[in-house]
Image (tube, helix red, strand yellow):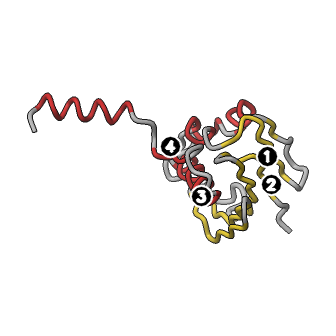
Amino acid sequence: MNKFSRIASVGMLLLLPSLSTMACGTSNDPAQVVQAQVDAYNAHDIDAFAACYAENVTITNLSGEHKVIKGVQALKSAYAFLAKVPKEFHVEIVQRVVTGPTVVDKERVVGLPAGKGRPDAMAVYEVRNGKILNVWFPPEG
């Protein structure tokens, strides 16, 4: 491969959407859609993350501690912190259960400073037409 071919190949790769973005909206498999948003979250890629959600998404913390997030623009605002967190910050899926359009993940947050935040959380996702339509975060204890 000559130098021009390598440069052209790299340039073409840059034009391709990220793998996470491609999985969101192209697959109706709820587990694949949820995993794609986890991958985008862990990559701190807010655009790829938001691409996994329906325009009219609703995210509800069932403890009542946080305001309900409605719509992709509100989601982008709420998750803007992803651009500022250290590279080490990510979630690991400890357990996943899929039933029809519902995906339930037990998640472990990694990369938080000691004593900051809650390391384990549950998330319940409803996926419709290849996008996450609803998310519920149950209260912890």
Query: For this view, does 96 lie left or right of residue 44?
Result: right
Q: Which residue is mark 4?
A: 22
The part of the image, by quadrant, that contains residue 31 is: bottom right
Q: Say the numbered circle drawn on residue 119.
A: none
Q: Which residue is mark 1?
A: 59
Amino acid tagged 3: Val
Query: Within 10 Å of the Cα at label 4, are there few (<14), some (14-19), or many (20+) other Cα atoms?
Result: some
Verify CB contact (< 8 Å) between mark 1 and mark 2.
yes
Viewer-side label of 4, 1: 4
Vertical comparison of 127 with 9: above or below = below
Q: Nearer the viewer, residue 32 or 47?
A: 32
Q: Earlier in the sequence, mark 1 or mark 2?
A: 1
Viewer-side label of 3, 4: 4
Q: Position of residue 114 (x, y in %)?
A: 63, 59
Vertical comparison of 66 with 121: above or below = above
Q: Quadrant of the N terminus?
A: top left
Q: Which residue is mark 2?
A: 136
Amino acid tagged 1: Ile
Q: Earlier in the sequence, mark 3 or mark 1?
A: 1
Residue located at (73% from left, 56% from top): 125
The part of the image, by quadrant, that contains residue 15 is: top left
Q: Earlier in the sequence, mark 4 or mark 1?
A: 4
Amino acid tagged 2: Trp
Amino acid tagged 4: Met
Query: For this view, does 133 lie left or right of residue 20?
Result: right
Q: What separation in Å lies between label 2 and label 3 (alpha carbons)?
A: 17 Å
